[in-house]
Image (tube, helix red, strand yellow):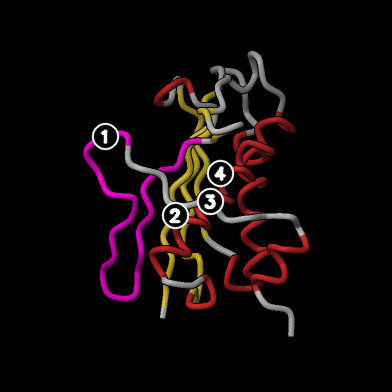
Amino acid sequence: MVTIQDKLAALGITLPPVATPAAAYVPWARSGNLVFLSGHLARQHGQPWRGQLGRDMTTAQGQQAARATAIDLLGTLNAAACDLSRVRRIVKVVSLVNSTPDYTEQHLVTNGCSELLAEILGEAGQHARSAFGVAALPLGACVEIELVAEVA
């Protein structure tokens, strides 16, 4: 049987430690079997991945940023659940995409996150989601994603 750790290793993914919050919030909050992860900014080389879709970033670049954000989210979820094998389901993903007013592919950018969650967690990674275009994100980041997961 292929484990979550096997899938991560096959993709060359090492889960990062939980990032220290940059403001007055916690990385996650648990209520019963639900874990609510705070928004995670896209990061590249340890720094906010800056840019605006439709201005200086392509949809493909945005998908890579959303994928990188999913890896950070999985690192936080791993800490919150004490192990990713305890994740029963990703319930909801909310994606904010820093984009110009005429950019309309926020949903495709967010696929970078959604596809990785499903690849790593299988059926438990399939989720409901929303993808919004916004005029700006903290620190000039191109993508911010939060999620809700059910854990054992």
Q: Amino acid at mark 2?
A: Leu
Q: Secondary structure at mark 2?
A: strand
The residue singled out by tag 3 in the image is 16
Q: Residue at x 39, y 25 (%)?
A: 138
Of tags 4 and 2, the one toward the viewer is 4
Q: Residue at x 34, y 75 (%)?
A: 33
Q: Amino acid at mark 4?
A: Thr
Q: CA distance from mark 3 to mark 1?
A: 20 Å
Q: CA distance from mark 2 to mark 1?
A: 18 Å
Q: Nearer the viewer, residue 78 or 113?
A: 78
Q: Residues within 10 Å of mark 1 (few under 14, many from 20)?
A: few
Report the residue that reaches farthest toward the bottom: 1
Residue 131, given in percent of the width and then of the height, sits at 52, 41
Nearer the N terminus, badge 3 or badge 4? 3
Q: CA distance from mark 4 to mark 2?
A: 11 Å
Q: Nearer the viewer, residue 1 or 99?
A: 1
Q: Nearer the viewer, residue 90 or 79?
A: 79
Q: Tag on residue 23?
A: 1
Q: Is residue 35 magenta?
A: yes
Nearer the N terminus, badge 4 or badge 1? 1
**Magenta region: which residues?**
22-41
Q: Residues within 10 Å of mark 4 (few under 14, many from 20)?
A: many
The residue singled out by tag 4 in the image is 69
Q: Quadrant of the C terminus?
A: bottom left
Q: Is residue 97 left or right of residue 22?
A: right
Residue 108, given in percent of the width and then of the height, sits at 67, 40
Q: Tag on residue 147?
A: 2
Report the residue that reaches farthest toward the right: 10
